[in-house]
Image: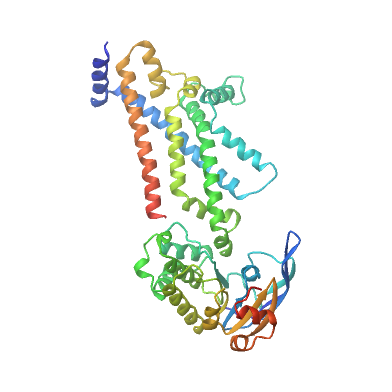
């Protein structure tokens, strides 16, 4: 198949809303949304706590979490694989090669981004707000809701960056998901597989969707910072 | 409102940082009413004294005491007013919620009306002009229904028109019964506003007198030099 007809076929897959195609896109989005939501649920409070507390070894922890932002996806995959494999500590859960395993791997990738960005954003805000909030009796954990809300635009950008990283990643979900058709096949794993099999239309179609998604994420991040500048100053 | 939290007593305050006595043996009493203004050169300890009185920092020696439990009964406006990344109204409501005020929305509306901020209510606070920010910061503090208001250099960043407006506000608040302790580096402002002067130099209280006699006949050579515009 030549490239031109592959493109034509790819667009046809998208425009006629091919069910197999949509199932793959849907699973990808579900897995990544869940992972980002979980990472936010854990990462926002954890980052806020790190921003507000001082203890011995805190700088080491901060540097370690910053470093984890660059955690290679295959290493994240390996960690989750070891945890979930039959002999691993969570082996009894029987989650290996399920969408849940992919969610875990992506959460592991997104979490350091959320924690790190939350800590940095809130620390800066706290420096600025400290006097006023202390004056109102909002110190320690009582200051956190104010700081999270006032950092909302920066934090939204961070969550979008996490979403971008998770949705584009292939190594980790391949290792723990297994790329099983109709079950754990995501956009990225499908592209890798279909390209090697020579099914270019499907790979191209998914690639176009993935690019569009990335574009949308970046547009949203840009909008968040613009809206932030306009409405929050 | 319970019994008055005044007088405020500062008794032998000292603040030591890196072996330096930034404040030393500072004692004064603030009774109810009036505008007491702390004047003195840079580094005299004016702002630190306000922060100690407001409870933001603790003294290394001496203590600050109130006649009654004063928690949340005194408010402070900082030299650089902190503007939350929210609307003008939300800034006031946030402060009221923080102190668990019984009717934050209504009280915020009162504050907006009292300080002529209605037209700006929905604007992002951080996009206000310097004068508007200062007015919002004072309105936000006023909304908390304090008995004492601490103002740290309330007009140091403002142009003359805004300064005039803020000074008029301070006088009005004082006439309404609010007790005010403020700092200024602007002697003209101290002349215009103060009922009483606390003159600080190098962390010590040098003179504590009613404003008229301080300006007419300063007792100490330091105060005379300061009023004459010399570097002391």
Q: Is residue A19 above or below residue B149?
A: above
Indicate the position of residue A9 as horizontal and vertical percent values. 25, 18
Query: Total marks drawn?
Result: 0
Indicate the position of residue B172 as horizontal and vertical percent values. 47, 82
Figure colour scheme:
rainbow
Give the quarter of the figure containing the C terminus of chain A: bottom left
Q: Hey, which quadrant is residue B44 in on the image?
A: bottom right
Residue A149 left/right relative to B201:
left
Give the quarter of the figure containing the N terminus of chain A: top left
Indicate the position of residue B42 as horizontal and vertical percent values. 62, 69
- Residue B4 is at least partly visible in this image: no
- Residue B110 is at least partly visible in this image: yes
Q: Hey, which quadrant is residue B182 in on the image?
A: bottom right
Residue A129 left/right relative to A195:
right
Indicate the position of residue A135 as horizontal and vertical percent values. 57, 64
Q: Hey, which quadrant is residue B85 in on the image?
A: bottom left
Q: As rendered, which of B26 and B163 lies closer to the eye?
A: B163
Q: As rendered, which of A88 and A141 lies closer to the eye?
A: A141
Q: Residue at x 53, y 49 (%)?
A: A122
Q: As rendered, which of A148 and A179 lies closer to the eye?
A: A148
Q: Residue at x 61, y 35 (%)?
A: A64
Q: Residue at x 24, y 15 (%)?
A: A5
């Amino acid at each position: 198949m030549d490239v031109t007809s592959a493109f034509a076929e790819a667009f046809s897959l998208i425009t006629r809303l091919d069910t197999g195609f949509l199932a793959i896109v849907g699973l990808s989005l579900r897995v990544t949304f869940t992972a980002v939501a979980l990472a936010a649920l854990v990462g926002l409070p954890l980052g806020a706590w790190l921003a507000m507390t001082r203890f011995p070894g805190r700088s080491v922890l901060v540097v370690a979490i910053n470093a984890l932002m660059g955690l290679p996806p295959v290493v994240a995959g390996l960690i989750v694989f070891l945890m979930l494999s039959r002999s691993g500590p969570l082996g009894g859960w029987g989650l290996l090669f399920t969408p849940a395993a992919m969610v875990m791997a992506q959460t592991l990738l997104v979490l350091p981004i959320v924690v790190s960005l939350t800590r940095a954003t809130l620390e800066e805000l706290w420096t600025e707000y400290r006097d006023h909030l202390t004056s109102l009796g909002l110190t320690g954990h009582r200051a956190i809701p104010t700081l999270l809300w006032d950092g909302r635009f920066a934090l939204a950008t961070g969550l979008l960056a996490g979403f971008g990283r998770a949705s584009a990643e292939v190594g980790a979900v391949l290792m723990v998901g297994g790329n099983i058709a109709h079950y754990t096949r995501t956009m990225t794993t499908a592209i890798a597989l279909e390209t090697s099999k020579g099914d270019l239309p499907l790979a191209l179609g998914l690639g176009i969707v993935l690019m569009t998604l990335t574009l949308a994420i970046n547009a949203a991040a840009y909008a968040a910072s613009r809206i932030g500048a306009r409405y929050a100053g | 409102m319970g019994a008055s939290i005044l007088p405020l007593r500062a008794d032998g305050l000292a603040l030591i940082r890196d072996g330096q006595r930034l404040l030393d043996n500072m004692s004064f009493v603030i009774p109810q009413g009036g505008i007491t203004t702390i004047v003195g050169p840079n580094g005299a300890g004016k702002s630190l004294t306000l922060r100690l009185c407001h409870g933001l920092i603790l003294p290394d020696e001496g203590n600050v005491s109130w006649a009654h439990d004063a928690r949340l009964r005194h408010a402070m406006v900082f030299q650089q007013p902190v503007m939350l990344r929210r609307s003008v109204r939300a800034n006031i409501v946030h402060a009221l919620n923080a102190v668990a005020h019984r009717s934050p929305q209504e009280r915020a509306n009162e504050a907006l009306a009292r300080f002529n901020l209605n037209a700006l209510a929905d604007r992002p606070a951080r996009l206000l002009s310097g004068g508007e920010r200062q007015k919002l910061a004072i309105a936000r503090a006023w909304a908390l229904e304090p008995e004492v208001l601490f103002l740290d250099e309330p007009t140091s960043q403002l142009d003359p028109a805004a300064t005039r407006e803020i000074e008029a506000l301070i006088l009005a608040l004082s006439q309404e019964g609010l007790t005010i302790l403020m700092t200024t580096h602007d002697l003209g402002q101290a002349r215009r506003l103060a009922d009483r002067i606390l003159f600080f130099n190098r962390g010590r209280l040098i003179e504590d007198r009613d404003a008229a006699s301080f300006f007419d006949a300063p007792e100490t050579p330091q105060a005379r030099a300061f009023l004459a515009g010399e570097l002391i």
